[in-house]
Amino acid sequence: MKSIYVGNLPFSASEDDVRDMFSSHGEVTSVKLIEDRETGRFRGFGFVEMDDNGAVSAIEALDGKDMGGRTLKVNEAKPRAPRPKY
């Protein structure tokens, strides 16, 4: 199972839109679009989890692809850096 970062999504994109786009490359386990904590508005990026082979195929096919007038940035998600504690 791989987690894929999907950036520069159009603000009109829905989880179903993203799922449909990635499902042609393999089985999509989950889609999570990130919202701003304070406003609840979509921040323009998200994460897709899918099987390893499908993930490689999706990254190669979708990185740089146009969606809603925006060029997608698609790559393997990196682990989140630890946040400093205050």
Image (cartoon, helix red, strand yellow):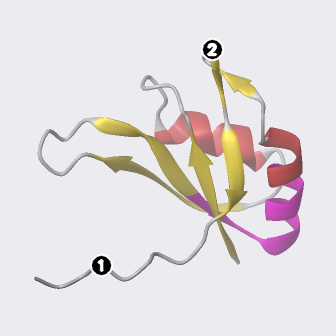
Residue type for callout 2: Gly
Give x and y (percent) for residue 77.
Answer: 62, 66
In the image, 55: left or right of 61? left
Q: Is residue 36 magenta?
A: no
Q: Which residue in the rendered view is the most extreme toward the top?
A: 69
Give x and y (percent) for residue 48.
Answer: 60, 58
Give x and y (percent) for residue 49.
Answer: 62, 65
* Secondary structure category for the residue under label 1: loop
According to the picture, the residue beneath numbered tag 1 turns out to be: 83
Determine crowd level at label 2: few under 14, some 14-19, many 20+ residues with C-alpha closer than 10 A: few
Above or below residue 55? Residue 14 is: above
Q: For the residues marked 1 and 2, what is the alpha-carbon distance in whole angstroms? A: 33 Å
Quadrant in the picture for residue 39: top left
The span shown in magenta is 48-58
Residue type for callout 1: Arg
Of residues 76 and 12, which is closer to you in this image?
Answer: 76
Residue drawn 60% across the image and 56% down it: 5
Residue drawn 49% across the image and 29% down it: 13
Residue drawn 46% across the image and 34% down it: 14
* Secondary structure category for the residue under label 2: loop
Of residues 18 and 8, which is closer to you in this image?
Answer: 8
In the image, 39: left or right of 18? left
In the image, 85: left or right of 3? left
Q: Are marks 1 and 2 in contact (CB under 8 Å)?
A: no
Give x and y (percent) for residue 2.
Answer: 70, 73
In the image, 19: left or right of 10? right
According to the picture, the residue beneath numbered tag 2 turns out to be: 69
Of residues 64 and 19, which is closer to you in this image?
Answer: 64
Residue drawn 75% across the image and 60% down it: 27
Quadrant in the picture for residue 63: top right
Above or below residue 38? Residue 66 is: above
